Image: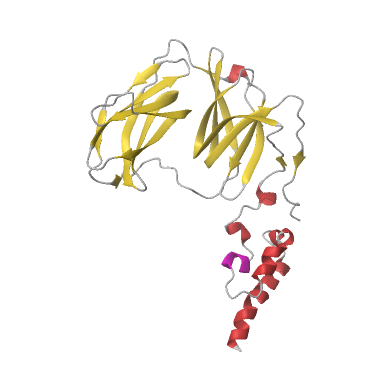
Amino acid sequence: MVLGIFFLLPFILLTDVQASGSDADQCARCHHEVVNNAIGKPFVHQPVLVSQCDNCHCPQAKTQAPTTTLTQEKIDWFGKDFTPRHNHWFELPQGMAGQELYLSSYETDAKVETRIELPLLAQAKEITAQATAPEISGLDVIEVKRGVFLSARIQWHTSTPSQTSCLYGEENASAPNQLEEQSWGQEHEVVLHGLVANRIYHFRAVAIDLADRKSISPEITFSTGKFFVKDGGNAVLPGNSVPLNIAADLWRHNDRLLVHLQSKGDVTLKIGRLKNDSAITTVSEHPPLV
């Protein structure tokens, strides 16, 4: 008798879910095969039993406005940064100020796509020719650890948006051992892989801004004699899905233009523009909640 109740319990609870009329129950109306597969099983995912699909999944019909159908054929994707962060910098093609920018982001469990209108060129922050080269500060080794390879994670800050690289080596911070960070920004991080244990390494950071002004930091050393993680580092960790709510501002020097895209949480970003003679249709990912 007890065993029979045990096997019937998921069916009873799932029946209650279907009759609850909650927002999360909308998932079961489209994904009914998931619910049917769960019925009668001795172990059922707890959020399913209590109609809380949105504990693990993003209910897009509830949190996202109708999205734009973006395909490789319609959009020229010219920039990407697959490191989750809330500040992204990209150099724009000429003539993009005031135009629509298309965004694509892979969240925790779904791809989110949208488009925004960029500020006008007159609203861009000017990087003047009289300004000094970017100042490098906060250069530090945040972590030394052993995984598949022994690695070190290094972070630093630049006073203006820059592209940066790290020069490192056992004898000195020389150019042959150079790791470049391709994306623009003011907060920078690189991970050095394939290091050797119990060695002393030297490194420098190099920064080049939009006006091609270059700065090189003083040389600093670190040891791989022990593993550590410092508190207060800016390590990017996987987190919960966040709505793709992006604010944009522009930086310029002569005819070069940078866009700074800031989100409320850590996201990856791919950006693009509409190709010539391409039509974009707006659709809803799910039926509306009623």
Q: Is residue 202 above or below residue 245?
A: above
Q: Is residue 185 left or right of residue 172?
A: right
Q: Is residue 246 left or right of residue 153?
A: right
Report the residue at 67% width, 45% height from top. Answer: 64
The one nearer the camera, 77 or 269, is 77
Q: Is residue 83 above or below residue 164?
A: below
Report the residue at 48% width, 18% height from top. Answer: 210
Q: Main secondary structure of the magenta part?
A: helix
Per the image, is 261 magenta?
Answer: no
The one nearer the camera, 134 or 214, is 214
Q: Quadrant of residue 115?
A: top right
Report the residue at 31% width, 37% height from top. Answer: 141
Q: Quadrant of residue 1?
A: bottom right
The percent position of residue 102, horizontal first and vertical second, equals 65, 32
Considering the image in quadrants, where does the C terminus appear?
bottom right
Per the image, is 48 magenta?
Answer: yes
Q: Quadrant of residue 273?
A: top right
> What residue span does the magenta drawing correspond to?
45-49
